Amino acid sequence: MSQIPISTAVPEEIAVQAVPDDDRLWVPQAPDVWFRPLMLNTITGQWCNLLKVTRAGIVSRHRHPSAVFGYVIKGKWQYDEHEWVAETGSFVYEPPGEIHTLRVPEDTGEMITFFNISGAMIYVDDDGNQTGYEDTFTKIQLCRDHYAANGLGADYVDQFIR
């Protein structure tokens, strides 16, 4: 009986507390909006993170070139372009290419959602014109800058990079 050899080129597992006890792990993204990196893949362009929002209103208008998967851990949110509301425990699938406006309702004090994203997040204005973007590499730089400034050290993000 032969065994399949284990590759030595496989990256290490990541097993971390998703919602951290240390608030310094939350990276500011916009006023009252943070993300917590969980995995940042520089080969495939995929990233997994938690998004935390502590205010009501529009968070962003954006689209993605690839599918996005989400799971609401706390609170609720919606897209202005759809009738549904993603509440605690909801799974969300977003098809590629669609423009959507993420809004946190007035009756939600805090929203935390896990997102699995491949490719870019392309920010757009009311007319659909690109105003900015985020990808794995911009996320890594935001983490490096934030962790360097708050005492964790710029290389703290390295544990999430694959």
Image (cartoon, rainbow, N blue to C red):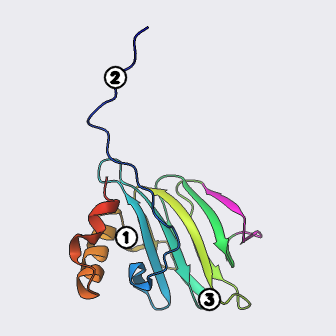
Kindly indicate the quadrant of the structure image that contains residue 46: bottom left
In the picture of the structure, the residue carrying the numbered disc 2 is: 5
Instruction: Name the secondary structure under disc 2.
Output: loop
What is the magenta range?
82-94
Extreme residue toward the right, this view: 83
In the picture of the structure, the residue carrying the numbered disc 3 is: 57
Does any portion of residue 79 appear in the rendered image? no
Q: Is residue 35 located in the magenta-colored stretch of the structure? A: no
Q: CA distance from mark 2 to mark 3?
A: 52 Å
Q: Is residue 6 left or right of residue 56?
A: left
Tell me the number on the disc at residue 148: none
Q: Residues within 10 Å of mark 2 (few under 14, many from 20)?
A: few
Q: Residue at x 77, y 70 (%)?
A: 83
Kindly indicate the quadrant of the structure image that contains residue 38: bottom left
Q: Residue at x 56, y 83 (%)?
A: 53
Amino acid at dot 2: Pro
Instruction: Name the secondary structure under disc 3.
Output: strand
Q: Residue at x 32, y 39 (%)?
A: 10
119 to 24, vertically: above or below: above
Q: Residue at x 30, y 30 (%)?
A: 7
Instruction: Name the secondary structure under disc 1.
Output: strand
Tell me the number on the disc at residue 133: 1
Q: Residues within 10 Å of mark 1 (few under 14, many from 20)?
A: some
